[in-house]
Image (spheres, rainbow, N blue to C red):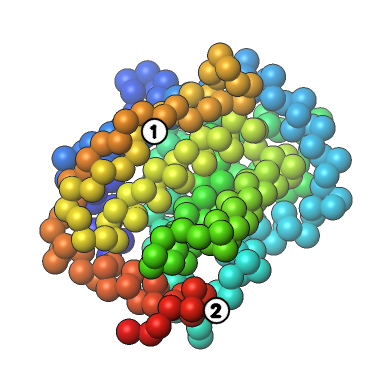
């Protein structure tokens, strides 16, 4: 199943590696562009990385566990267990493998230095990964997970106040997981914004792939690391764009698993079992 999903995604670097584009669907439609931050921006954010070290004592247990296991934190919001939600876990595992494959390509293309490479004062509390800092992988994966869980638990009749509250909790958890990587000293704030934008774009693609439509419309995104109206980067809203996917029969395995995962959460909204 993963090869089929990956076949519909491609990372395209600008000739000078000043940006990366995510191309989705059989016609390779651009759904995301992430621009490279300047060295000056990284240096400007270094003081905040160093200042955030004061939060390490409180967040150390989270940070250490999240180096190996992020999903356990989402299981504090929803009862995700192998016995109760096997299809949901399978969907999330596929999504995280997909995210890892894409984010690593972008990290190697941008090859941006980590905070500790700018100053020995950072003194990260965990081992700094050997690949580039930008975009943030943990932030990307946490955002994809939050989006998919929100979609899986969406009531059949649409959003309601209870689901809105759940969606907000999932989103805030994704943000905190990303923030913890900055507190630990291995990332900059701008990495978080880029990772979040990539996670949103990958979630758009996965959700489109998991539904029957062959030409779904998805948001088109651009992440500008240094817009004139913000200090730490912003996602630019653009008109939606249609992507072309394989026929539903060629996506039947994911469609089936997605339906099973949706079924696992019907109790949450007091929906009748089919």
Q: Is residue 21 visible?
A: no
Q: Position of residue 21 (x, y in %)?
A: 34, 32
- The residue carrying pointer 1 sits among few (fewer than 14), some (14 to 19) or many (20 or more) residues within 10 Å by Cα, namely many
Q: Which one is earlier in the sequence, the residue at label 1 or at label 2?
A: 2
Q: Label 1: state its secondary structure.
A: strand
Q: Is residue 147 left or right of residue 233?
A: left
Quadrant that contains the C terminus:
bottom left
> Is residue 249 shown above or below 104?
below
Please report the residue visible at 70 percent of the width from the left and 47 percent of the height from the top: 180
Q: Nearer the viewer, mark 1 or mark 2?
A: 1
Q: Is residue 196 left or right of residue 45?
A: left
Q: Is residue 34 visible?
A: yes
Quarter-wise, where is residue 132 in the image?
top right
Quarter-wise, where is residue 242 in the image?
top left
Q: Position of residue 153 (x, y in %)?
A: 47, 67
Instruction: Identify residue for label 1.
Output: 221
Instruction: Identify residue for label 2.
Output: 81
Q: Nearer the viewer, residue 153 or 130?
A: 153
Q: Nearer the viewer, residue 168 or 144?
A: 168
């Amino acid at each position: 199943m993963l090869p089929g999903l990956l076949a519909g995604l491609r990372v395209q670097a600008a000739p000078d590696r000043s940006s990366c584009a995510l191309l989705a669907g059989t016609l390779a439609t651009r759904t995301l562009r992430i621009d490279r931050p300047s060295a000056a921006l990284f240096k400007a954010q270094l003081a905040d990385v160093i200042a955030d070290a004061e939060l390490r004592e409180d967040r150390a247990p989270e940070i250490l566990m999240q180096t190996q296991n992020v999903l356990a934190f989402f299981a504090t919001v929803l009862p995700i267990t192998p016995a109760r939600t096997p299809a949901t876990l399978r969907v999330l595992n596929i999504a995280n493998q997909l995210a890892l494959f894409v984010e690593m390509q972008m990290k190697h293309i941008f090859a941006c230095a980590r905070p500790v490479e700018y100053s020995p004062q950072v003194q990260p509390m965990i081992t700094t990964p050997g690949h580039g800092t930008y975009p943030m992988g943990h932030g990307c994966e946490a955002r994809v997970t939050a989006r998919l869980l929100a979609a899986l638990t969406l009531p059949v009749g649409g959003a309601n106040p209870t689901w809105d509250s759940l969606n907000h909790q999932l989103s805030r958890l994704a943000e905190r997981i990303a923030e913890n990587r900055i507190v630990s000293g291995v990332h900059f704030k701008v990495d978080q914004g880029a990772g979040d934008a990539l996670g949103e774009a990958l979630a758009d693609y996965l959700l489109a792939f998991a539904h029957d439509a062959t030409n779904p419309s998805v948001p088109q995104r651009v992440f500008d690391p240094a817009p004139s109206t913000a200090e730490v980067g912003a996602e630019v809203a653009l008109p939606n764009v249609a992507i072309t996917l394989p026929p539903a029969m060629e996506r039947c395995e994911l469609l089936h698993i997605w339906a099973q995962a949706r079924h696992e959460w019907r109790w949450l909204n007091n929906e009748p079992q089919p």
